[in-house]
């Protein structure tokens, strides 16, 4: 019998104590300081938290850009989150699972998280260029059942070349698109991507 998937979570009350918000917040450091304290993040069976808003599953959401264009793709039928199939996305990432060699957050929680993000992205795409990585926002959407049990940590990877290829079959129609082009297909975007697109300029204004 296959072992059940374990996913990284925090309790909702931790988010509430720091300050509940809807949409995006750019006060990243204040939240992450509280999220990555020993005993706060933990791995739990996905079945126990997938429909339980008492927990927030931490999801890295990585935006990739080259010059003024952002990587975009459509989630196919094999997407890990069935409720998002068919939507266009500008975020790459997913649930954080424990690796065989990963300490269960008993050392440097933040560095362990960043290592897990790189592994998660590498499972979906191959980035064949150097890049910078900045956490630019946190994302919370209580307006739907998917958002109520997830909390996004929005990364912005600035690529030195537009060299990204897919590894996951569920990713289709991959292309780099300008914000204006993304606005033209806004009605096809998944909720998180729509929220990011709305405030893209604010998220990236201090990055180069």
Image: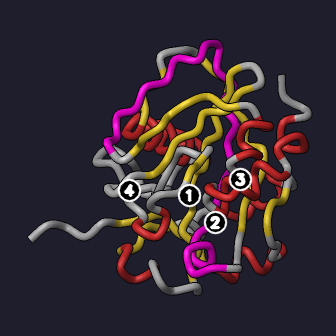
Circle 4 — which element?
loop
Q: Position of residue 121 (x, y in %)?
A: 47, 39
Q: As rendered, which of 35 and 52 lies closer to the eye? A: 52
Q: How is the image coloured?
A: secondary structure
Q: Nearer the viewer, mark 4 or mark 2?
A: 4
Circle 3 — which element?
helix
Residue at image point 58% right, 15% down = 130
Q: As rendered, which of 22 and 19 lies closer to the eye? A: 22
Ranked by sequence position, the earlier of labels 1 and 2 is 1
Residue at image point 56% right, 58% down = 59
Residue at image point 45% right, 51% down = 75
Tell whether position 152 is magenta. Answer: yes
The magenta span reads 144-169
Ranked by sequence position, the earlier of labels 4 and 3 is 4
Q: Position of residue 1 (x, y in %)?
A: 8, 71
On residue 59, the disc is 1
Q: Which residue is mark 2?
A: 151
Q: Which residue is mark 3?
A: 186
Mark 1 vs mark 2, CA separation in Å: 6 Å
Q: Residues within 10 Å of mark 2 (few under 14, many from 20)?
A: many
């Amino acid at each position: 019998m296959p072992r059940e998937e374990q996913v990284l979570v925090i309790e909702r009350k931790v988010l509430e104590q720091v300050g509940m918000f809807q949409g995006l917040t750019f006060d990243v450091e204040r939240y992450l300081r509280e999220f990555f304290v020993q005993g706060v993040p933990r791995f739990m069976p996905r079945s126990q938290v997938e429909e339980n808003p008492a927990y927030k599953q931490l999801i890295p959401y990585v935006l990739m850009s080259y010059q003024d264009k952002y990587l975009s793709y459509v989630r196919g039928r094999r997407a890990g989150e069935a409720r998002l199939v068919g939507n266009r996305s500008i975020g790459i990432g997913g649930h954080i699972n424990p690796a065989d060699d990963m300490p269960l957050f008993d050392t440097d929680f933040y560095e362990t998280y960043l290592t897990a993000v790189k592994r998660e992205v590498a499972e979906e795409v191959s980035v064949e260029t150097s890049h910078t990585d900045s956490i630019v926002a946190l994302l919370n959407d209580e307006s739907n059942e998917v958002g109520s049990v997830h909390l996004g940590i929005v990364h912005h990877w600035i690529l030195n070349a537009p060299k990204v290829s897919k590894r996951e079959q569920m990713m289709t129609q991959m292309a780099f698109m300008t914000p204006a082009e993304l606005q033209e297909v806004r009605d096809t975007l998944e909720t998180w991507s729509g929220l990011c697109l709305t405030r893209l300029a604010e998220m990236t204004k201090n990055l180069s």
